[in-house]
Structures are given as C-alpha cells and as structure tokens.
Image (cartoon, grey):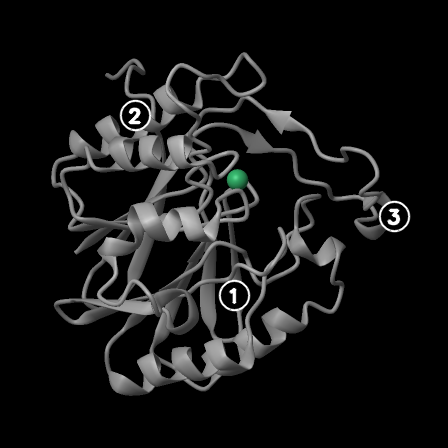
Amino acid sequence: MIIGHLSDLHALAPGRKLMDILDTNALAERAVKRINTLDPAPDFVVVTGDLTHNGGDDETRHARAILDALKPPYLALPGGHDDLSVFNSVFGDAFSNSDAWARDGACKDLEDLRIVFINSLGDGEGPSFSAERARALNAMLCDRPNAPTIVCMHHPPFQCRIPVSTYIDDPDASWALRLGDTLAAHVQVRLVLCGHVHRSMVTAWRGANVIVAPSTCVQVDPNFNDFHANADRSKRNFQLIAEDPSFMLHYWSGEDFISYVLPTRDDYARA
Ligand SMILES: [Fe+2]
C-alpha cells in the first residue's frame, strides 16, 4: 500500500504567478504528472492544505482541476491560505458528509489502514482544535482501534522552529495539547501527516511519527536561532528558497511505514 502526499500547492487563478515570478500552477501540475507516472502507482493521495494562495473561488476551482488529473483517488484538506467556505463548495463533495466534515472530520478505510482527516483551521490564519473536534476524532479512532491509522491535517502540532510555525502566536499551543491528548489514547495512530511550513520534517510526538511534507512550489528556510526572539510578526521574518519542489510517498508494508521525499522533477541524469 502506497499513500502519496502532496502539500501546499498555492495554486493561483489560471495564468497568474506568485509574486509575478513563480508559476505555482505549473509546479502543482508537475507534481500531479510525477505521481501519475509512478510505477507502482500510489493507492491513494492525501493533500494537506494550502491548495490555493488566496482562497478565491477561481483559485480553488483551478486547484481542483489540477488535482482531478491525479490517476489515484485523492482527498484534500484546506490550509490557512484556503477559504473554508469556498473549499467546501468546491471540494466538499469528496466528503461523505460535506456539511459536517469541518467539525467532525472524515475517514477513509483502505484495506487494513484507516486514514483520518481533521480540520485544523481556526477563525483566522492560525490553527484550532476544539473540544468538539477532539470528541469527533476520538470517536473515529475508537471505531477501529485495531486498524493502523494515519491522521492528516494541515498544521504541524509541534514546535517546528520555522518562522511560519503556529507557535509564534501561541507558544503553549493549547490546540496541539488537546490534539496530543486525544491521539495519545490511541496506540494505533502511526503517522500524523501535515503541511503548512514548506519544509520536510519528522518528529516523534505523543506516540506517533509526525511527518511534514515539503511544498510542491517553494520551501521555507528553517530558523535554528532564538525562535521567539525572531518572531516579529510586524515584518516578514522568513525566507523562501527555490529548492526542488517535492512531495512524499508513505509505503505501508503491513507492519511498518517507510516514508520517502521525492522531487517533482523527473529529468535528473540516471546511470
Ligand atoms: Fe503553504
């Protein structure tokens, strides 16, 4: 079983470029094309948010058109750059209950695996994980306690030491504490897959391996200095890097997961 993992496409309206220079639409299309040429093909693809850059209707519909070209079935979550109501109008039909998924989450069973999708969006750009969402997640995890489970969400719940981390605004990250307490009660949660920070990272957190996917468009420079001292939100405090756009594959052997980062380019010399 192979799960493809795309994140942070930042699609724009057709013909537009990010900062007038970066063709995020073409880069997202390249990621989709790369997945479609994999052999063996992924059995399923998850997309962990920031499908668009500004959340507009035209951008969201274009992101859907790009992702609908995926050959494997997929399910996408919104990120902080997306507009939840627009997302629901364009992508909501993918959820069995499009009205309730943002509150209750959703799950997809693939053979022995369960993939759980949760909404980590708050009212503003930052994340949220309410007691109501925790109860819904707990119910999805109690439902198949013996199924190895992947939880997908947009915001990484740990301190990433990257300037766009949610911990700038909420050093205690109460939303993440509630999420961690919920997950820690369910030993079958093996992976938590996230996006948001445009940097591939792995950590062990509350009994699960949390894996953050790189972006299909542009990456962010990690900040290993005094994180909070550099957390001045009055000015742009992060640096974008035009490293190779990438995505991930998570291979399930039946006993363990093995995760891979692959560039979306496929024109490297081979020998
Ligand atoms: Fe993003």
Residue 109 in percent (x, y) is at 18, 68
Disc 3 and disc 2: Cα gap in Å?
38 Å
Disc 2 and disc 1: Cα gap in Å?
32 Å
Say which residue label 3 marks.
229
Identify the image quadrant of the C terminus.
Answer: top left
Identify the image quadrant of the N terminus.
Answer: bottom left
Q: Which of the 4 quarters of the picture holds residue 187? A: bottom left
Q: Nearer the viewer, mark 2 or mark 1?
A: 2
Total marks shown come to 3
* Callout 1 secondary element: strand
Label 2: how many residues lie within 10 Å, few (<14), some (14-19) or many (20+)? many
Viewer-side residue, 190 vs 182: 182
Say which residue label 2 marks.
29
Q: In the image, what residue type sits under mark 2?
A: Glu
Q: In the image, what residue type sits under mark 1?
A: Ala
Q: Give the residue displayed 57% in from the left and 44% down from the top.
A: 197
Q: Is mark 2 within 8 Å of ligand 1?
A: no
Viewer-side residue, 63 vs 190: 63
Viewer-side residue, 264 vs 251: 264
Say which residue label 1 marks.
204
Viewer-side residue, 110 vs 236: 236
* Callout 3 secondary element: helix
Disc 1 and disc 3: Cα gap in Å?
26 Å
